[in-house]
Image (tube, rainbow, N blue to C red):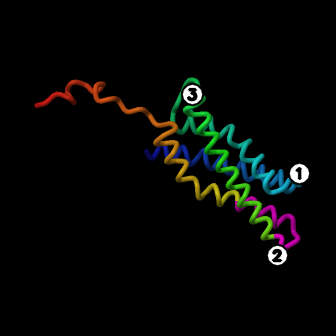
């Protein structure tokens, strides 16, 4: 279990750094709104996150099952991105009452996005480990005879 948590955490760190960099670029350099910057950053970083999570962290290989893996992963990512975008936009609206510095706004928007993802990290691990990428347990009838025989 430690190896899986470590790999998932590593993927999360990579995704977080990528997302934060993209939020900063989209919000500061391209002057997108907090919502647009956060949504675009999260959508783009979800692509490598899916493959790294599935293949490296959970050791799945072969083709992805579209309805059992891809759609739920993207749904979880979508809900997370929308939540992060809404909270980041609210934080951006609040920080504008205290400063006119776009750089400070960028820090607040990026930090808020990171905070939201930190909060839901544990929930996502539970969903990925126990539902989405769970290894099926053998059925009772598939157990070796030595485990099912009465003594």
Given residues 114 and 148, the one toward you in this image is: 148
Q: Nearer the viewer, mark 3 or mark 2?
A: 3
Residue under label 3 = 65
Q: Secondary structure at mark 2?
A: loop
Q: Earlier in the sequence, mark 1 or mark 3?
A: 1
Q: Secondary structure at mark 1?
A: loop
* Residue 23 horizontal side relative to residue 56, left or right: right
Q: Quadrant of the N terminus?
A: top left
Residue under label 1 = 30
Residue 116 occupies quadrant = bottom right
* Residue 2 horizontal side relative to residue 11, left or right: left
Tally of marks: 3
Q: Is residue 114 above or below residue 44?
A: below
Q: Is residue 18 above or below residue 148?
A: below
Point out residue 52 in the picture as x, y percentages from the top left corner: 61, 37
Give the main secondary structure, helix, strand or loop, of the magenta stretch.
helix
Q: Is residue 45 above or below residue 55?
A: below
Point out residue 82 in the picture as x, y percentages from the top left corner: 70, 51
The residue under the point 81% across, 67% down is 104
Q: Earlier in the sequence, mark 2 or mark 1?
A: 1
Point out residue 62 in the picture as x, y percentages from the top left corner: 56, 24
**Dots 1 and 3: beta carbons under 8 Å?**
no
Q: Earlier in the sequence, mark 3 or mark 2?
A: 3
3D distance between C-alphas at marks 1 and 3: 36 Å
Say few, some or many: other residues with alpha carbon within 10 Å of mark 2 (under 14 / 14 to 19 / 20 or more): few
Given residues 114 and 88, the one toward you in this image is: 88
Residue 67 occupies quadrant = top right
3D distance between C-alphas at marks 3 and 2: 48 Å
The residue under the point 54% across, 27% down is 61
Residue under label 2 = 98
């Amino acid at each position: 279990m430690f190896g899986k948590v470590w790999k998932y955490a590593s993927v999360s760190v990579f995704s977080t750094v990528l997302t934060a960099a993209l939020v900063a670029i989209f919000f500061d350099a391209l002057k997108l709104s907090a919502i647009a910057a956060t949504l675009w950053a999260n959508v783009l970083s979800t692509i490598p996150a899916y493959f790294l999570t599935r293949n490296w962290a959970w050791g799945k290989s072969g083709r992805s099952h579209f309805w059992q893996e891809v759609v739920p992963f993207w749904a979880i990512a979508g809900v997370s991105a929308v939540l992060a975008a809404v909270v980041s936009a609210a934080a951006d609206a609040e920080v504008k009452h205290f400063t006119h510095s776009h750089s400070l706004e960028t820090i607040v928007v990026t930090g808020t996005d990171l905070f939201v993802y930190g909060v839901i990290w544990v929930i996502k691990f539970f969903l990925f480990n126990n539902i989405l990428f769970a290894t099926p347990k053998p059925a009772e009838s598939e157990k070796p005879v030595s485990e099912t025989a009465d003594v």
